[in-house]
């Protein structure tokens, strides 16, 4: 989103039971990848269920600037005609990735091993985020990077046409870094290998296979994974049905759990086991969540969630190992914890500090503003639940998930909860207010 846009403060208020049978928008991770991989493949890829949020639309524009043809039918079906791996053309203007960390980091991997120079920029939030985590391994292929302020965008990538294959051990659990390295490997002669100490979401591996790429995945003795592919590869167009986003389903899910007598069905949710940490956690907290109609589509498991507010939640310890499978869900988990009996400890949240905002700080400030007892110990966040006083104004720092999480907090609080800017919600969940409002959630523009 544009940082110069006028802020749109929004409040939410105690709502009572919510009910509905809904579909949240398409998965953001899968949507980005479907456009990128379609743009690298030979032939035309049809994408249905694409998330039409600002982040993904920025990726569509980026792929067009690099030579792919990306179009949308009136019924919401997208078509991507690719140029083939190795054949991207040099963009003649700066590529603006908006708010999208996934967009800029994966795109950096793609262009790093093409003989072109690409300039990337983004909004005020993206221009604060570290790119060194991708620039370091991608430099090993032979690409060069120019960034400002110790690795922040704007960023120029000078790609190489003599890429050397790389074996890289991830210093942090990050699907974005893993994917950037693998995507650079597509146009590199030889075997590119990524070793990840903790498994992170594997949509890149699954979708590359769907496009005909041979991706080898081994589970290591320590539970980590070694992922490799041998390039240069040829990718073949393959249709994609994008499942709905579990990170967006998280908001109606928690809203239903904290409002007794609620009942919500959420359809066609991506249930990739590396994305379901929040569901596991909420069930451990006593939440009534049932998965039905489980099936496979385009290499991903999907299903429907039935969530009710019949049980009161209780506090638990959320182990550090679970963090990669629910990394985007901690803000809304902190909201669930605010309504749970006792203490919830969320362990090892260091990565939250480099998301769309410093999410650990933003969540703590939002809880503070609304009278929720909490503390930070090292990289752990501990929330003591009970009655939520509310009444506070939360700064969103251009972070969609902070905005949505605190609007959900307000749905059960004693006094309304406000966020200073609801605009960032459009990056991942453009119809959030309408969908939640239709189920009974009370939102009002804050004057
Ligand atoms: C994503 C990976 C995660 C996640 C982001 C989407 C992806 O980031 O937070 O929203 O699509 O690969 P990290 O890889 O930095 O953990």
Image: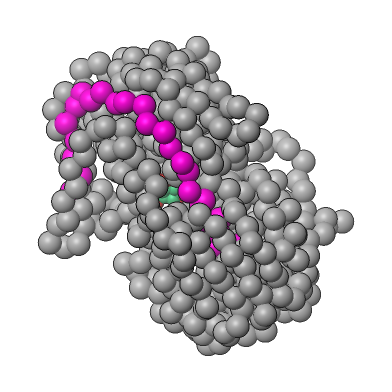
Q: Residue at x 73, y 37 (%)?
A: 5
Q: Is residue 149 visible?
A: no
Is 304 in front, or is 219?
304
Q: Is residue 233 magenta?
A: yes
Residue 308 at what x, y percent from top left?
A: 59, 75
Q: Is residue 128 magenta?
A: no
Q: How many marks?
A: 0
Q: Is residue 89 visible?
A: yes
Residue 377 at what x, y percent from top left?
A: 44, 74
Left or right: 300 with respect to 182? right
Q: Residue at x 58, y 27 (%)?
A: 72
Looking at the image, residue 115 lies above or below residue 11: above
Is 69 in front, or is 118?
69
Looking at the image, residue 128 lies above or below residue 147: below
Q: If the image is split into quadrants, where does the N terminus sit?
A: top right
Toward which corner of the image does residue 258 lie, by quadrant?
bottom right
User: How is the structure coloured here?
Assistant: one colour
Q: Residue at x 50, y 54 (%)?
A: 268
Residue 10 at what x, y percent from top left?
A: 77, 56
Left or right: 317 with respect to 9? left
Q: If the image is split into quadrants, where does the C terminus sit?
A: bottom right
Residue 180 at what x, y percent from top left?
A: 33, 36
Q: Which residues are magenta?
A: 226-251
Q: Residue furthest right?
A: 447
Is 112 in front, or is 51?
51
Toward which corner of the image does residue 17 lie, by quadrant?
bottom right
Q: Residue at x 21, y 39 (%)?
A: 215
Q: Residue furthest bottom?
A: 342
Left or right: 249 with respect to 417? left
């Amino acid at each position: 989103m544009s940082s110069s846009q006028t802020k749109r403060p929004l409040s939410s208020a105690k709502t009572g039971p919510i009910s509905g049978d809904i579909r949240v928008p398409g998965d953001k991770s899968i949507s980005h990848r479907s456009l990128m991989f379609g743009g690298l493949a030979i032939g035309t890829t049809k994408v249905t269920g694409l998330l039409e949020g600002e982040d993904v639309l920025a990726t569509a524009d980026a792929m067009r600037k690099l030579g792919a043809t990306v179009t949308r039918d009136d019924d919401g079906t997208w078509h991507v005609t690719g140029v083939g791996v190795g054949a991207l053309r040099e963009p003649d203007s700066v590529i603006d990735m908006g708010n999208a960390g996934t967009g800029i980091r994966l795109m950096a991997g793609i262009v790093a091993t093409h003989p072109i120079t690409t300039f990337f920029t983004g909004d005020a939030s993206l221009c604060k985020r570290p790119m060194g985590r991708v620039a370091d391994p991608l430099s090993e292929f032979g690409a060069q990077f120019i960034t400002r302020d110790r690795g922040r965008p704007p960023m120029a990538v000078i790609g190489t046409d003599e890429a050397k294959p790389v074996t890289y051990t991830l210093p942090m659990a990050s699907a974005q870094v893993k994917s950037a390295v693998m995507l650079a490997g597509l146009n590199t002669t030889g075997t590119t290998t990524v070793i990840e100490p903790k498994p992170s979401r594997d949509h890149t591996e699954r979708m590359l296979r769907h496009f005909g790429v041979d991706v080898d995945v081994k589970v290591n003795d320590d539970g980590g994974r070694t992922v490799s592919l041998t390039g240069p590869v040829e990718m073949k167009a393959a249709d994609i049905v994008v499942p709905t986003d579990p990170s967006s389903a998280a908001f109606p899910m928690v809203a239903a759990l904290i409002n007794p007598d609620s009942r919500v069905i959420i359809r066609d949710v991506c249930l990739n086991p590396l994305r379901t940490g929040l569901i596991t956690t909420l069930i451990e907290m006593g939440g009534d969540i049932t998965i039905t109609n489980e099936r496979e589509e385009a290499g991903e498991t999907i299903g429907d969630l039935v969530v009710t507010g019949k049980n009161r939640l209780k506090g638990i310890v959320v182990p550090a190992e679970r963090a990669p499978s629910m990394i985007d869900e901690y803000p809304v988990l902190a909201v669930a914890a605010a309504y749970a009996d006792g203490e919830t400890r969320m362990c090892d949240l260091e990565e939250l500090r480099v998301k769309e905002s410093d999410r650990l700080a933003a969540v703590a400030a939002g809880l503070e503003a609304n009278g929720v007892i909490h503390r930070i110990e090292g990289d752990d966040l501990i929330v003591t639940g009970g009655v939520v006083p509310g009444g506070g104004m939360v700064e969103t720092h251009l972070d969609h998930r902070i905005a949505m999480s605190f609007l959900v907090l307000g749905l059960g609080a004693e006094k309304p909860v406000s966020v200073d800017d609801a605009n960032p919600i459009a990056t991942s969940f453009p119809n959030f207010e309408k969908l939640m409002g239709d189920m009974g959630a009370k939102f009002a523009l804050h004057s």
